[in-house]
Amino acid sequence: MPVVIWGPGEPAQMHARDESLALESLELAHDQFQVVVARWSAG
C-alpha cells in the first residue's frame, strides 16, 4: 500500500526522545498544509 510521509523535520528525528526541528521547517510546512487543505476543500 503506497503511503506518503509528509511533514516538517527530518525523518530520522521522528518520534525520537529528543525530537526537534528548525523553525523554518515548521513555517514552510504550515504554508504547504494551508495550500493543500484549501485546494482539497475547494472540491
Image (cartoon, helix red, strand yellow):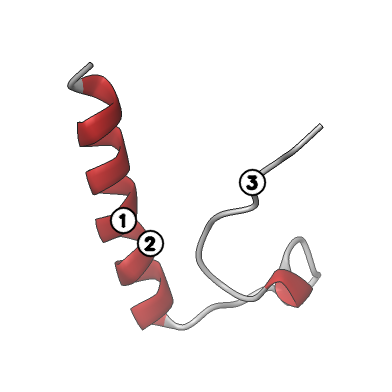
Say which quadrant the N terminus sits in.
top right
Q: Which residue is mark 1?
A: 32
Q: Residue at x 50, y 66 (%)?
A: 8
Rate crowding at label 2 as few (under 14), some (14 to 19) or many (20 or more) other CA atoms within 10 Å.
some
Q: Which residue is mark 3?
A: 4
Could you tell whether 9 is left or right of 19 in the image?
Answer: left
Question: Which residue is labeled 2 in the image?
Answer: 29
Q: CA distance from mark 2 to mark 3?
A: 14 Å
Q: Is residue 43 left or right of residue 20?
A: left
Above or below, comparing residue 42 to residue 35 in the picture: above
Q: Residue furthest top?
A: 43
Q: Name the residue type under label 3.
A: Val
Q: CA distance from mark 3 to mark 1?
A: 15 Å
Lower position in the chain sequence, tag 3 or tag 1? 3
* The image quarter in which residue 10 lies: bottom right
Above or below, comparing residue 1 to residue 12 in the picture: above
| Disc nearer the start of the sequence (2/3) | 3
Residue 33, given in percent of the width and then of the height, sits at: 34, 48
Task: Tell me which corner region of the image, top left, top right, bottom left or bottom right, holds residue 9.
Answer: bottom right
Q: Are marks 2 and 3 in contact (CB under 8 Å)?
A: no
Type of residue at label 2?
Ala
Residue 18 spot, x, y in % from top left: 74, 77
Mark 2 or 3: the one toward you: 3
Q: Which mark is residue 18?
A: none
Q: Say if mark 1 contacts mark 2, CB within 8 Å.
A: yes
Residue at 52% across / 58% down in the picture?
Answer: 7
The quadrant holding residue 6 is bottom right
